[in-house]
Amino acid sequence: MADAALKKTGELIYEAIGLKKQFDNGKVVALRGLDLEIRQGEFVAIIGPSGCGKSTLLQMLGSLDKPSEGKLNYRGKSLPDFEDHAAYRSHEVGIIFQSFHLLPTFTVLENVQIPMFEGKASRSERKTRATELLESVGLGHRLSHFPSELSGGERQRVAIARSLVNNPSVLLADEPTGNLDSVSAVQIIDLLVEVHHRLGVTLVLVTHDPSVAERASRIIQMKDGVVISDRLANSN
Ligand code: ADP
């Protein structure tokens, strides 16, 4: 169903062929043989009704869960067969969730450093990197605050800073504005668009909100576990 006008220029990042995911011994089929290609530098929105498999797809792309059947490649290699899924999750992709997933007993500055703990960076390098990222998302004045002291929009900014700390090539965002008021939601999408352009990061965003989807360059619509349309967004 690919739109002929879709760009085919960037390197192929994700390729899914006949991707299936079942739960509860096959009683629930979340993905029913989904085909998809995502290329370097794209901003793709994935839309569709609740329960159509959007989050399940994002979980597969983020290697947070494994497909039941079918092929899923990341840069030409089978993602489910990667030896080190934790390394993929901390270095290749940044993942942002609706509910932020910040650690409540850690400060903002500490939360952003968490994905760096396994790496080689020294304590001061970690602190400098996290501080720079927090300043770049407008939170330089909140470094020693705890998540509970921040607004929802500020918490999502922390999560975005954390997702970028290891320079991922892909950002996966699952309903990143789902817990936010409309003003904060626009600010968070503005920030994601800015990050996408400034860092050239490939952005895959799941949303049920058409106004959010229209900010993307490409909109993939899912229904019943498959892609039913794939088009350029109106804004392009
Ligand atoms: P969406 O993100 O489009 O709302 P999901 O991917 O969350 O859809 O869910 C797709 C289907 O898979 C739904 O029927 C959901 O109930 C089911 N599902 C998702 N995750 C699980 C799970 N861990 N166990 C059982 N069923 C699940």
Image (cartoon, helix red, strand yellow):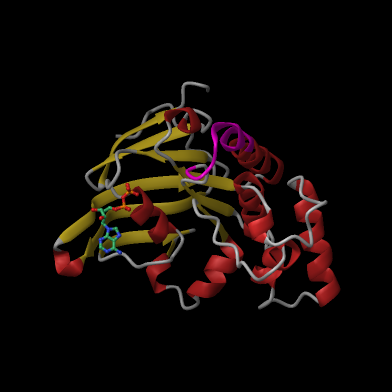
User: Left or right of 159: which side holds 39?
Assistant: left
- Tell which residue pokes out farthest to the front in this image: 149
Which quadrant would the N terminus be assigned to in this image?
top left
Relative placement, left or right, of 126 versus 27 is right
Q: What are the residue bounds of the magenta stretch? A: 178-187
Q: Quadrant of ligand 1?
A: bottom left
Residue appearing at x 50%, y 77% in the figure: 84
Residue 85 colored magenta?
Answer: no
Residue beneath the point at 39% across and 73% down:
81
> Horizontal and vertical percent for residue 218?
46, 33
Figure disc tally: 0
Q: Residue at x 22, y 65 (%)?
A: 23
Closer to the camera, 100 or 96? 100
Of residue 85 and residue 162, the one placed in the foreground of this image is 162
The rendered magenta stretch, by its main secondary structure, is classed as helix
- Let me know if residue 164 appears in the view: no
Question: Where is 63 relative to 35, above or below?
Answer: below
Q: Residue at x 83, y 70 (%)?
A: 125
The x, y position of residue 75, in whole percent, is: 49, 58
Q: Residue furthest left?
A: 27
Which image quarter: residue 93?
A: bottom right
Within the magenta stretch, is there residue 181? Answer: yes
Judge left or right: residue 28 versus residue 162. left
